[in-house]
Image: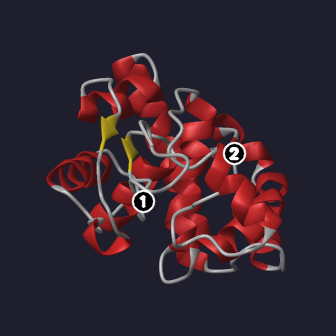
Amino acid sequence: MERCGWVNDDPLYIEYHDTEWGVPVYDDRLLFEYLNLEGAQAGLSWYTILKKRENYRRAFNRFDPDKIAQYDEEKIKELMKNEGIVRNSLKIHAVIANAHAYGKVVQEFGSFSRFIWSFVDEKPIQNHFDSLEQVPASTEISTRMSKELKKRGFKFVGPTICYAFMQAVGMVNDHVTACRCHKGA
């Protein structure tokens, strides 16, 4: 079966591509997880983070924002010693800041999902790119999302990270047209 060219032959990566990437996600906790994992990816490859995802889930209380918002210096020291995650102080502190910001967004909008999906009018964007070279690194929407998230206190949410997040959670479907996962292929 034809797949997007960024997928390697690791069954973990194939499974991610075939069953997760580009599939709409509306669950608040899962959206929070993806946003933070995309932030962890900054400067690295998604494949690196994907291989560490289960470690991240264990280290960060399955990305429960309420628990993460309570992290103290002892927990941060513990995370900095965890070889199963990317031990970058700025990225670890960003997850905690994001948990605090997440709570405020939920108070304001009723759910994180409602806030996030409002950037695409609650409907996935179906793109029709024939090659990976046509897929943008960021868009006007991801730039707007980035500005809004930063304004609310989120960290590691630049326009490129936001666009990768949008792709991952199915706000945009960027499977190339020849890919088995492209709608209408």
Looking at the image, residue 53 sits to the left or right of residue 7; the answer is right
Q: Residues within 10 Å of mark 2 (few under 14, many from 20)?
A: many
| Amino acid beneath label 1 | Ala
Can you say whether 129 is above or below 144 in the image?
Answer: below
Could you tell me which secondary element the residue under label 1 belongs to?
helix
Number of labels in the image equals 2
Assess whether mark 1 and mark 2 are in contact (beta carbons under 8 angstroms).
no
Q: Quadrant of the C terminus?
A: top left
- Residue beneath the point at 63% across and 45% down: 20
| Amino acid beneath label 2 | Phe
Residue on which the image places disc 2: 63
Q: Determine which of the numbered discs, if any, sits on residue 129 in the image.
A: none
Residue on which the image places disc 1: 164
Looking at the image, residue 167 sits to the left or right of residue 135; the answer is right
Residue 62 visible in this rendered orientation of the protein? yes
Distance in Å between CA atoms under marks 2 and 1: 19 Å
- Residue beneath the point at 82% across and 79% down: 81
